[in-house]
Amino acid sequence: MVSWILPFGVALVTGILSSWGVGGGTLLLVCMTLFLDVGQREAQAVNLLFFLPTAAIGLFFHRKNGFLDKEVWRQSAVPGALASLAGALIATAVDVSLLRRPFGVFLLYSGASMLWSARKGK
């Protein structure tokens, strides 16, 4: 009966962090694979679905508040969508064990970059 509490808590925390710009989608992916025993491919699919409404709402409010650079948006929307589609197709064709190491390296690099920039800012 309480099996929904952990997934709900993970979604809530990552949703809050995502709204603060912390990268909740990445945290969602990590939490799902480590704590909820979800396969990496399934977690990536959920992560993409998690991102779509967040991005749409962000785009709406950036446009509403005048922060949207329309020229940059026009130039990047189609290539970004095509690159995302290509990446998703490649990810489904590649063995999951090959994806784990580069993703782990990416997470370590991202974390180190954030820590390094935070220390430089002081």
Image (cartoon, helix red, strand yellow):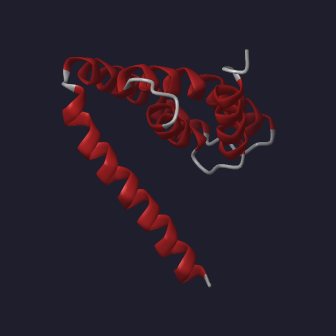
User: Where residue 70 appears, x then y in whole percent?
Assistant: 60, 36
Q: In this rendering, would 37 be left or right of 91?
A: right
Compared to residue 89, the image places residue 13 above or below, namely below
User: Where residue 95 appears, x then y in whole percent?
Assistant: 19, 25
Q: In this rendering, would 57 be left or right of 103?
A: right
Quadrant of the rendered image containing residue 42: top left
Compared to residue 93, the image places residue 77 above or below, namely below
User: Where residue 102 appears, x then y in whole percent?
Assistant: 26, 45
Q: In this rendering, would 109 be left or right of 55?
A: left
Residue in front for this viewpoint, 54 or 31: 31
Compared to residue 111, the image places residue 58 above or below, namely above
Residue in front for this viewpoint, 89 or 7: 7
In the displayed orientation, state which residue is furthest to the right: 65
In the displayed orientation, state which residue is furthest to the bottom: 122
- Taking the spot 30% from the left edge, 53% from the top edge, the residue there is 105
- Taking the spot 70% from the left edge, 27% from the top edge, the residue there is 8
In the displayed orientation, state which residue is furthest to the top: 1
- Taking the spot 48% from the left edge, 28% from the top edge, the residue there is 77
User: Where residue 94 appears, x then y in whole percent?
Assistant: 19, 24
Is the N terminus in the top left, top right, bottom left or bottom right quadrant? top right
